[in-house]
Image: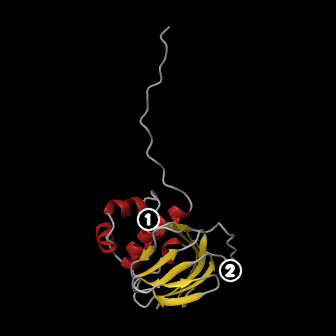
Amino acid sequence: MARHTPSSAPEPSPAPAAGPIMLIAVSVRRERERARLSLTELAKRARIAKSTLSQLEAGLGNPSVETLWALAVALGVPVSRLVDPPRSSVRVIRAGDGPVTHSEQADYAATLLATCPPNARRDLYRVVAQPGAPRASEPHTPGTTEHVVLATGRALVGPIEAPVELAPGDYITYPGDAPHIFEALAPDTSAILISEHI
């Protein structure tokens, strides 16, 4: 009797991720279509590869802070509109939970804590960063102002040409529509960042 050998099937394509990545995928596509932009045009405006944008809208990959900010600026929306899930009237985010995006250039992670409700203009983030390369931000949408309260560690924060060293409890505000940085000077530096929009 001949022995049956199963034929080798091709490897399946990776399935789109669930959770926050799919939420971002749906949000980016929604905002791109709302702005009536093609994939090519949005990628060009955001200065990212069209293939990166295509994968993002398919729910593949893991977009960095820089990619999300670039897309938000190109779309003319706060970055929170791309990452925040629908909310109930009471919301608790435990430490370590929430939608987190990571930087490509620094050991820096931003967790969106709250977005602006209708007719309000602010988003709230918890930032955790490690010493090393600073997180340098391109200008956000015109009229953006950022507020930072340092919780732990030490950091240089503010305009890229004149950042200020902060200790726990210190507060700084600066234009978010000009280049700015967040550079951790101690391990496990953390802060609360509020981004206000016009």
Count of picture labels: 2
Instruction: Residue at 45%, 64% (x, y): give it.
Output: 63
Secondary structure beneath label 2: loop
Q: Is 146 rendered above or below residue 10?
A: below
Q: Nearer the viewer, residue 57 or 72?
A: 72
| Residue 164, horizontal then vertical, whole percent | 50, 86
Q: Are marks 2 and 1 in contact (CB under 8 Å)?
A: no
Check disc 2 and report the residue beneath it: 89
Location of residue 40 by image quarter: bottom left
How is the protein colored in the picture? secondary structure
Badge 1 local density, few (<14 within 10 Å), some, or many (20+)?
some
What amino acid is labelled 1 in the image?
A: Glu
Disc marking residue 104: 1
Badge 2 local density, few (<14 within 10 Å), some, or many (20+)?
few
Mark sitting earlier along the chain (2/1): 2
What amino acid is labelled 2 in the image?
A: Ser
Comparing labels 2 and 1, the label whose residue is closer to the camera:
1
Location of residue 91 by image quarter: bottom right
| Residue 144, horizontal then vertical, whole percent | 45, 88
Q: Is 172 rendered above or below residue 42?
A: below
Disc marking residue 173: none
Instruction: Residue at 41%, 36% (x, y): give it.
Output: 10
**Left of 49 or right of it: where is 82?**
right
Q: Is 10 rendered above or below residue 31?
A: above
Q: Nearer the viewer, residue 34 or 12?
A: 12
Q: Nearer the viewer, residue 153 or 103?
A: 153
Spatial CA span between label 2 and label 1: 34 Å
Location of residue 118 by image quarter: bottom right
Instruction: Residue at 32%, 63% (x, y): give it.
Output: 49
